Image: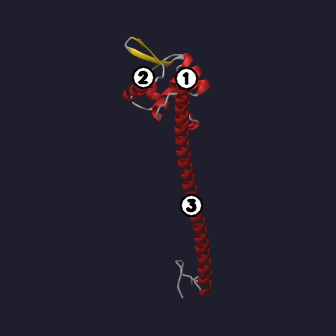
Amino acid sequence: MERSLLGRPNATLGSGNNSANDELKQRFEAALKGIREEFDDHRESINDNTNEIEANYELVCRLDAKVDRLQEQLEHLQLSLANVLGSPAQASAQSSIGLDEKEKEVFLVLYTGSDEKPLTYREIAAALKESEFLVRGYITNMIEKGVPVDKKYINDTAYISLDKSFKDRQAKGNIVHLSQRTVREFAV
């Protein structure tokens, strides 16, 4: 018989206690295995849902691009029809401006931020987390595409804003084709 540290016989190491410990250990391992399986199932369902959300998002983006192309083609058809019939085209078709996504972001900064005072390139770049060089390029592209941008120089610093009447027309007719997705992503 084994002796404990105090010199007494150690009676707790009997075979009855070992089987109880083994049974408890088996129960514990079974419970852990069940929990692990539940976590694995949960993780798989989260991954499946994430993949489905990504697929839906890609589909919505493709649909949005197709709608934009259809809108451009419709406007082109309206202009062509107006030329054939000899009637003036609608003002909204003539004043349609196609901007890429980054140009739309710059446009939104100017549209929302230049009400109180014109913005500098540095302020626009900071709002978009872009370089001033890129912002200058985007604004130049916007001007070339027909967006009426007002520039004023004070002490060798350019102050940029959108033409007020153009802002009003944009609010009424969405001239630059801002999608809800672009506005939501900009707001975030």
Give the foreground label among 1 and 2.
Answer: 1
Measured in 3D between alpha carbons, the distance from the residue under mark 2 to the one under mark 3, in whole angstroms, is 46 Å
Answer with left or right where residue 18 lies relative to residue 129. right
Q: Quadrant of residue 174?
A: top right
What kind of residue is marked 2? Answer: Tyr
- Residue 86 circle label: 1
* Residue 16 lies in quadrant: bottom right
Are discs 2 and 3 less than 8 Å apart at CB?
no
Identify the residue at horizontal 47%, vertical 31% (top origin): 99
Report the Cα–Cα distance between label 1 and label 2: 44 Å
Residue 157 place in picture, x, y as percent: 39, 15
Residue picked out by circle 3:
43
In terms of secondary structure, where does tag 1 sit?
A: loop
- The residue beneath circle 2 is 121
Amino acid of disc 3: Arg
Residue 73 in the image: above or below residue 137: below
